[in-house]
Amino acid sequence: MIGGGVLGRGTVQEEIRFSVAPEHLLTLLVCTNMRDDEAIQVVGCETFSTYTGYKSSLHFSGNYVDSTPLAADGTVLSALAAMDALDFRKVLGYDDASQELRVQLSSPLLLRELNKAACAFAAEDERLSRMPVATGNWGAGIFKG
């Protein structure tokens, strides 16, 4: 689900992004689930807060004045690309660590991940085609990926 645990007790990358730019929260209503051939792009969300820390040390540290450039129509020229990861704790269905990489690199699963990345990073709006891309630690290994 997009947003991770933002409405619960989540305090890592995805939840932090949704908290400091709360307009992203609307995607929880509109994009309740992603198919294997889908990714989500959210354009124009403004950042309102700063923070310090991570996980248990995460704290609001103040207001943020977003100086991101605006389009002629007032849209904030920022974008969030979201693609869901496979939870290999469930996909693998066994505890044989020697098989994990072989399964993850199988053609159908590898193709799924490559298609999602292509969809997530394809600029659907001309204004996005020149934007830089920044990523975090894509899941940080939580799903054994």
Image (cartoon, rainbow, N blue to C red):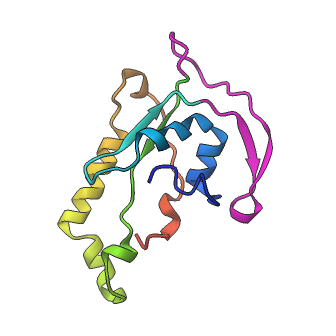
Q: Which quadrant is home to the C terminus? A: bottom left
Instruction: Tell me residue 12's x, y (percent).
Output: 62, 58
Q: Is residue 58 left or right of residue 40?
A: right
Q: Is residue 54 left or right of residue 74?
A: right
Single out the residue that lies furthest toward the top.
72
Instruction: Tell me residue 102's x, y (percent).
Output: 26, 78
Q: Hey, which quadrant is residue 67 in on the image?
A: top right
The residue sitting at 52% across, 25% down in the picture is 77
Please determine whether, in this image, residue 91 is positioned above or below residue 127. Answer: below
The residue sitting at 47% across, 41% down in the picture is 29
Single out the residue that lies furthest toward the front.
29
Number of marks in picture:
0
As rendered, which of 5 and 102 lies closer to the eye? Answer: 5
Single out the residue that lies furthest toward the right.
62
Instruction: Tell me residue 9's x, y (percent).
Output: 64, 60
In the image, residue 47 lies in the stretch drawn in magenta: yes
The residue sitting at 61% across, 57% down in the picture is 8
Q: Hey, which quadrant is residue 18 in on the image?
A: top right
Q: Hey, which quadrant is residue 90 in on the image?
A: bottom left
As rendered, which of 15 and 124 lies closer to the eye? Answer: 15
Q: Which quadrant is home to the N terminus? A: bottom left
Q: Give the magenta range.
A: 46-75
Please determine whether, in this image, residue 139 is positioned above or below residue 126. Answer: below
Instruction: Tell me residue 7's x, y (percent).
Output: 60, 52
The residue sitting at 36% across, 73% down in the picture is 88
In the image, residue 56 lies in the stretch drawn in magenta: yes
Please determine whether, in this image, residue 101 is positioned above or below residue 132. Answer: below
Q: Is residue 26 left or right of residue 103?
A: right
What secondary structure is the magenta-colored segment mainly? loop
As rendered, which of 44 and 104 lies closer to the eye? Answer: 44
